[in-house]
Amino acid sequence: MGNTSMTMPLFLFLLKCLSINLQLLVSSCLLWRECQKSPLPKMTTDWKTIRLFPIPSIIYLIHNNVQFATLIYVDTSTYQIMGNLKIVTTGILFRLFLRKKLSNLQWMAIVLLAVGTTTSQVKGCGEASCDSLFSAPIQGYMLGILSACLSALAGIYTEFLMKKNNDSLYWQNVQLYTFGVIFNLARLVLDDFRGGFEKGPWWQRLFNGYTITTWMVVLNLGCSGLLVSWLMKYADNIVKVYSTSMAMLLTMVLSVFLFSFRPTLQLFLGIIVCMMSLHMYFAPPGMLVDQPSTGKADPESLVDVSIERRTDS
């Protein structure tokens, strides 16, 4: 998929750029349709509000570069496992910045989710790939932790923007994705100047080697981004974390049937732990803890007992 002469970080970056362009196009069309109806959607246009929307794009841009830098020091298995740290960091920032209180059971559920997803990704013991697990230099681990914190920070700040007012979701998306496109284009132009335009300007190689599979990936990234914005507006980051983790586990299960993937014991254990975490977080506390019976005794039963005692005496 893609041109073999193109480096993988650049290719992934171009995929994300195209997906953001797709999200901007779809959001613009939906906003236009919304404006044709009455009453008109609420759209805040003052500078004090608009100036906040470039911040998530800057955070995501830094996060993408940190991700590519992390892969220089760690292997893909370690990188995938360290990525689960964002589950815990999201919960911490969710509490600190959005002031959302979580119960002790919910904190335990979040930690269990991170443990479950990690367990499902660990390969079987005795495999050669296990020897390199967590054997990377300290720079790799520091970048992995930074990547998890940046990912959580970008999600938390985006939720703050989405819920800051009652503006139209599509208007908020247009602002987010517009700044995202601007910063990504700036990054591409900067790379061209650094490389001295050796391979030509970025727009000449933007679609090099693209196949139907590549376009399906772009479509998938675009649709998932739009769904995430809906979650940020009407749910929260914790729901996003659970949906992402469950989607990953569902992908593993579907791989068993579609690609003859051989499930491991770790996969089954991870799925069980994640399902327990899901139940712990969203179920009412009364379903998780047995409450002692505090009801008063029936007066009629007390009368019957006293009569029986008198008869016996």
Image (spheres, rainbow, N blue to C red):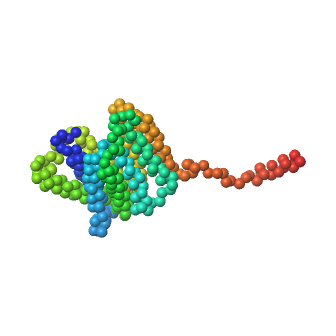
Q: Residue at x 19, y 57 (%)?
A: 186
Q: Height in image: 80 above or below 253? A: below
Query: Is residue 86 positioned above or below 4 on the image?
Result: below
Question: How far across and down, in percent of the image, does residue 7 sit?
Answer: 20, 44
Please state the horizontal and vertical placement of residue 112, each as a whole percent of the image: 46, 47
Q: Is residue 197 left or right of residue 124?
A: left
Residues 56 and 300: in front is 56
Indicate the quadrant where residue 233 lies. Answer: bottom left
Q: In this view, does 162 lie above or below 209?
A: below
> Quick one: quadrant of the N terminus?
top left
Q: Residue furthest right?
A: 313
Residue 27: image location, x then y, percent: 28, 54
Q: Is residue 178 visible?
A: no
Q: Which residue lies furthest to the top in this view?
A: 260
- The percent position of residue 153, horizontal first and vertical second, equals 35, 57
Relative horizontal placement of residue 222, taking residue 311 as reference (left or right): left
Q: Which residue is drawn at 87% across and 46% down?
A: 312
Q: Which residue appears at 77% of the width and 50% of the height? A: 301
Q: Nearer the viewer, residue 182 or 260?
A: 260
From the viewer's perspective, is 58 left or right of 239?
left
Q: Is residue 264 visible?
A: yes
